[in-house]
Structure formats: structure tokens, C-alpha cells
Amino acid sequence: MSLFSVIVPCYNEEQNVAPFYEELIRHTGFLGQRNMDLEILYVDDGSRDRTAEEVKKLRETDDRVHLLTFSRNFGKEAAMYAGLEHSAGDYVVIMDADLQDPPALLEEMFGYMDQGYDCVATRRVTRKGEPPIRSIFARMFYRLMRHISRTEIMDGARDYRLMTRQVADAILSMEEYNRFSKGIFGWVGFRTKWLEFENVERLRGETKWSFWKLFLYSLDGITAFSTAPLMLASVVGVLFCGIAFLMILFIIVRKLIFGDPVSGWPSLVCIILMTSGVQFFCTGILGQYLAKTYMEVKRRPVYILKEKL
């Protein structure tokens, strides 16, 4: 029999562990017709509640349930990487425990795999239940990434995707510490089918993604899959040098022809402040890339396991 691995990153999802399991089992009855076995790999990302204990309860009655527990919170990116690394399935899917990734889509996703696709990815066509400001900035981010990155990053893309073992291994081959999986999924390529669905709100609990965390995550995506900000800093630098040169010529000509004294201290101060701000901005861009490089060369592990069942 072939094996189907379900990877479930969890962070303080005590209330959702059992409901997710029940919903998954209810919608994976078709696996028997495919002569396919199931493994469910919960990855506890350093939860502060009883998430691990709830998974262990499930394991007492179903040995297909497995658990990886981190020594602390390393983030969802690390949890997905750990799940892929420890999964053994011929087919692998990543799903959130809050049921925002509907298990009801799995049978349809396998249908597309039968058509020769290597990966079936999902994207939301609506953002129902999401704060309007967050939705606006999210769309702006995806629009920006389409213009500055050569990697396909679809608007509304979820981490919920079904892939072959070959795709999973390709993702694992990218061992970078600063991970942005939405970009990695697109970078590795392979034939991908996009499956659209309407947004589903969380079953229980609150989202762990604040606006600030999403903003920092977007910066990770930009610096990981585009060098456009570095080009922007160079262009701005050349532009201001050109403006400065023209202003010097203007002042010299004005003095020689009209004899006007050099004046305008208030405007001069404004110009100095503006150019200083641009310099700090460009330095900040360089700092972001330097910080990512610094973290990569340290070669720290993406995660540390505390327990493995």
C-alpha cells in the first residue's frame, strides 16, 4: 500500500486537535479505494496549552497519529519543514488544525493528481471574516511580489497543498534558515494545479498572526525572493546624486549671472533631512539583507525536537 501523510502544524490549538482529526477521518474514506494508508503528523510548535496532551489522547486509540514536539516556539515555517522531514508518505499534504483548510477538498485534490499534476495548491478567493485593513495590505503585498519577484506567489495562496514525495523532497533540499514557504513552493516548480475555495473562518480560538507578525513575514518574503529593494536603493542614490549636481550648477549660474547670494536656510535644512532619511532607508534595506545572510551563515538548526512519538 502507498502512504498518505497529513502534516498539521499546531501552536496553542488544544481546542482544535480532536475536531480536526474527526473531520479529517470523515473525509478520507476514499483512501481505501486507492489502496492507500494514512498517517497524521501533528507538529506541536512549542504550545503553551495542552495541545500535545490532546494529540497523545488520539494516539491511544489510533496508531496512525504521530506527534513531534518542539523545545520552544520556532514558528509555522519550521513546523512545516519538520513535518515534511519526518513524513514518510508517497503523497503529502499540509493542513492547519483550525479547519480553515477544508478536508472535504482532499478527494478532489487527488483527482487532479490523477491527471498528472505534481502538486495541487489552494487559494482563497474571498477573505470573509478577516479585518479589512489586513485584507488590503495582503493584496498589496501579493501585487508587489508579482512585480518584483520571478517566483510565482499567488494572491490568497494557502499553505494547504497536496504534493508528491518528489516535490516534498525538493522543498526539503532548500535548507535555508529564513524560510518563506509560499515562495519556496513556487521556486521548486513542478506542474501545479490551483484550486480555489471561499475563505473558512477558524473553528475555535484566535489567530496567531497579528498584523505586525504578518508585516515581518512579508519582509521575509520580499528579501528571500527578490533583490529589487537593493536595486531601488541604488537607483535612489543615483537619482539624488543627479539632483545634487543640477542644484550645484543652478547655484553657480545664478550667482554668476544674477549676482544673487546663496540663501534659503529653511529649504536647505529640509533637503538635508530628506536626504538623510533616504540614506537611512537605503541603509535599512542593506541591513535586512545583511541580517538574513548573518543568520544563514551561522547554520543554526531550523528547529529542535523535544519529543517524537
Image: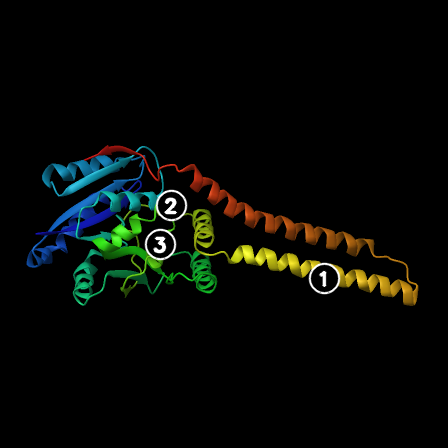
Which quadrant: the C terminus?
top left
Q: What element carries label 2?
A: loop
Q: Is residue 60 above or below residue 142?
A: above
| Alpha carbons under labels 1 and 2: distance apart | 41 Å
Dot 2 amino acid type: Glu
Q: Earlier in the sequence, mark 2 or mark 3?
A: 2
Q: What element carries label 1?
A: helix
Q: Do the residues labelled 3 and 1 touch (CB within 8 Å)?
A: no
Say the numbered circle drawn on residue 243. 1
Q: Earlier in the sequence, mark 1 or mark 2?
A: 2
Q: Where is residue 37 in the image (x, y as percent from the top left)?
A: 10, 50
* Left or right: 235, with 21 as reference point: right
Dot 3 amino acid type: Ile
Q: Name the residue under label 3.
A: 184
Q: Position of residue 72 (x, y in %)?
A: 34, 34
Dot 1 amino acid type: Ile
Q: Is residue 153 above or below residue 21?
A: below
User: How would you rate the neighbour count of disc 1 (Cα within 10 Å): few for under 14, some for 14-19, many for 20 or more?
Assistant: few
In this view of the protein, can residue 66 be seen by the observer?
A: yes
Q: In which quarter of the image is residue 250?
A: bottom right
Say the numbered circle drawn on residue 176. 2
